[in-house]
Image (cartoon, grey):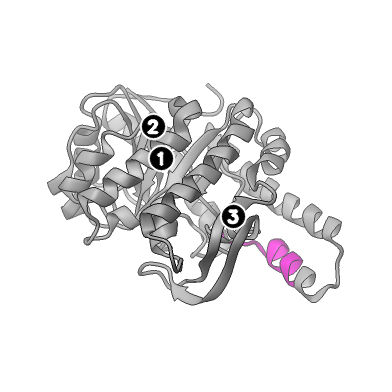
Amino acid sequence: MIVWGMVLGGYPRSRLARYALRDAERGSIPYLELHKRIALASAEIIGAQKAAGLPVVVDGMVDWHDIFRPFIRSWRNVSVNGLLRYFDNNFFYRIPVFTGEPDIIEPVWPQRVREYSLLADPATLKVVLPGPLTLAKMSEHPGFRDEEIADLVANLLSREVSLVQEYGVYVQIDEPILSDRKATRDDATLAVDLASKILGPVSDRGIFAVYFDFPSKQVLEKLLEVKARYLMLDIEDSPARARENAVPLTGHVPVVGIVDGRRIHTDRLSDTTVSIVKALAEETDEVVVTTTTWMDLIPYRYALKKTSILGEIVRELASRVGGEVRTLWR
């Protein structure tokens, strides 16, 4: 079995990034200076992942306020309203408000991919997109049903993918709403159908991610139909539920959330975790280790530490399952 690792999503802001964004908001630095400082902060984050031997890296997305905002700003007929808590995190996001059918003013990812792919080399860059269902359910859209907004969003995200696929990037769709205890089989069906459409051209490098809890059995059954090579599940936030619901991810490579992205404690690879991984990976010869969620809620120095720990857990898990480590260097 081949075992390798990647960080799931965004990083917290370093002091350099915080000060750059603060100065830009005050109007004390021009856009080009902001762009330079964010690029330097992102280069440090990419470098930390490469140092840990991770073959797929994220740019850190330190200039994003939340997973929705960059896209909302780049679409017509969408604005932001008040604040709402993002799941059970000590974090609030600006609520997207759809006033009509959204359309792209300027895509979010192509320019980033052109710049950060060079920094990532020889690792491969990963693009992260908000799941259409999660965005629809966590937004306001008077006059539209959730299903209508989700479909419109999927069309725009498909265009993002079409503009970056030539760079060989991995593409991840985040649908944390499907870990909610109230998520239904119909919710999963819609999310899977839309994700499969978005990831169509890059399905062999496509990742479908569900985190903050392990999904119910009825949801997980539908997730197995997604047209994405990689299926990410958070197994550390609720190990008991993960152990109860884990089944072989037939037709998919398991991406297992082991390193806790929301807490600063040092992570350990338990026997329970290893048994869950074996259950999920029973019918595959590959497994990917990742963080349980984005790491943007913990202090920056702990995020860097956990990046290194992730590399260590990859090696330990490979040893525990009799596998071989795939790193950036081999």
- Tag 2 residue: 228
Q: Amino acid at mark 1?
A: Ala
- What crowding class fits label 3: few (fewer than 14 Cα within 10 Å), some (14-19), or many (20 or more)? many
Q: Nearer the viewer, mark 2 or mark 1?
A: 1
Determine whether, in the image, residue 36 is placed left or right of residue 231: right
Q: Amino acid at mark 3?
A: Phe
Q: Nearer the viewer, mark 2 or mark 3?
A: 3
- Tag 1 residue: 195
Determine whether, in the image, residue 17 is placed left or right of residue 330: right
Does the CB distance between marks 2 and 1 fall below 8 Å?
yes
**Where is residue 74, by image quadrant?**
bottom right
Q: Position of residue 167 (x, y in %)?
A: 63, 28
Q: Amino acid at mark 2?
A: Ala
Between 192 and 45, the one lying in front of the other is 192
| Span shown in magenta | 12-22
Quarter holding the N terminus is: top left
- What crowding class fits label 1: few (fewer than 14 Cα within 10 Å), some (14-19), or many (20 or more)? many
Residue depicted at x 26% and y 29%? 321
SS class, disc 3: helix
- What crowding class fits label 2: few (fewer than 14 Cα within 10 Å), some (14-19), or many (20 or more)? many
Residue depicted at x 53% and y 59%? 68
Q: Position of residue 185 (x, y in %)?
A: 21, 49
In the rendered structure, find residue 71 and report the number of the disc placed on it.
3
Q: Position of residue 306 (x, y in %)?
A: 47, 52
Q: What is the distance, in whole Å, between disc 2 and disc 1 at their CAs?
A: 8 Å
